[in-house]
Image (cartoon, grey):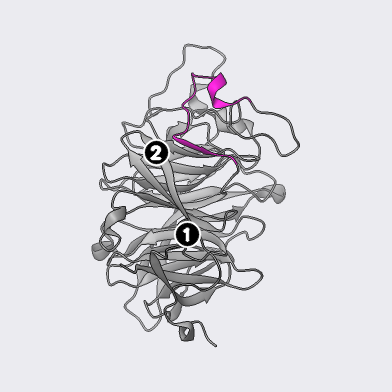
Amino acid sequence: MNVRGLAIVLLLVAGTGVRADGRVPFAVEPVTQFDEPWALAFLPDGRMLVTEKKGVLNIVTRDGSKTRVTGVPDVNYGGQGGLGDVALHPDFSDNGSIYLSYVEAGADDTRGAAVARGTLDLSGTKPVLKNVQVLWRQYPKMLGYGHYGHRLLVDDSGYLWISSGDRQKFTPSQDMQSNVGKVLRIRDDGAIPDDNPFADYFSEDPLVDDIGVYPEIWSLGHRNPLGMDFDLEGRLWVLEMGPLHGDELNLIRRGGNYGYPEVSDGDHYDGREIPDHSTRPEFLAPAISWTPAISPGDLTFLEGRQFKAWRGNALAAALGAEAIVRIEVDGEAAREVERYAMGARIRAIAEGPDGAIWLLEDERRGSQGRLLKLTPTR
């Protein structure tokens, strides 16, 4: 049976889409599948852009038909690395510009994330990405294959936000002469906004090299931020993987320091303890900390066009928990209210133009990850 032949199902396997009280709040429709999908974004006509880690960018119709886009930059694939996020320029309808994040190779077997802007040309028989220009790079490039972060977000003013993971190196998250382990903000052409908190940074400490401070930094002390979105009030929230437990949802403040690796509500994988957030009040504490971990993959706030009761809630895609986690936000406070088991690692989540919720499975027990459409059943 093909994926479309499964049609709409209310319960695929025990636990799929089931609330704690046993009711099923949404129908789950498998649409198509991909080889290691990572992110999705909606075009103005309702079609989707879907990335695959090995370097494939697809245009996908709502019924699951796929067309590959040529002209995508070469990616360094391996471990957690490859082609990552995709986002549209706010003036996409006029300029056709999109952003892609991906991992690129460096010297001596190093690698790091990069963000490029290109023009998506849909005028021909096959879509092509043209005029590709790199706007940002992780620095320094490092050995290893993990914790790139590289989620993308575009705000209403056209600024591009980038999450940059700590590359599993810990200390760079506190190093202002590195853009690793940070949340970053740049203009749509890669330039630095004048009102960034460290754009005019100057230290009176003669041992601090001010020239080396990265002016795109908006906040620091992050580990591996893999979810990033604005709530309906315009506040930025970031969801990030902790070490051994201690995943975090953080309300991001201009110039804020979130403490990693000095503090975490988790511990190192080798058993060494990390001081909890409560021990260091000078660092900003998370709104939610998960122990045991959910292993977050993505975050979206809902306008609630179909899921009206969930308007203003956040949904977290959970990899390790194989679930959707629903979060209520009240001002600067947040709490998990429900969790929906999906039976697979959930990599990406987004609300479509019509209000349906779309998911990408990272994988499904050795098979390809599916694109799923969720619609309310009441």
Q: Residue at x 59, y 45 (%)?
A: 293
Q: Position of residue 101 (x, y in %)?
A: 49, 55
Query: Circle 2 sits on which residue?
Result: 334
Check the image and report above or below for 89 versus 356: above
Instruction: State whether residue 44 appears in this view.
Output: yes
Query: Horizontally, is 188 left or right of 138 in the view?
Result: left
- Coordinates of residue 353 in the picture (x, y in percent): 28, 65
Residue 351 spot, x, y in % from top left: 35, 61
**Residue extending furthest right?**
270
Helix, strand or loop under label 2: strand
Q: Residue 35 falls in which quadrant of the image?
A: bottom right
| Quadrant for the N terminus in the image | bottom right
Residue 348's label in the rendered image is 1
Instruction: Give the magenta range.
Output: 275-291
Q: Is residue 43 above or below residue 155?
A: below
| Magenta region, main secondary structure | loop
Identified by mark 1, the residue type is: Ala
Q: Earlier in the sequence, mark 1 or mark 2?
A: 2
For the residue labelled by badge 1, is the local secondary structure a helix, a strand or a loop?
strand
Instruction: Name the side, left or right, on which 57 lies relative to 108.
Output: left
The reply, left or right, for residue 224 in relation to residue 306 is right
- Tell me what residue is drawn at x 42 percent, y 23 percent: 201
Work out how far the residue at label 1 is from the one at label 2, CA to CA, in angstroms. Answer: 21 Å
Residue 29 in which image quadrant = bottom left
Tell me if residue 37 can be seen: no
**Residue located 56% across and 33% down the image:** 173
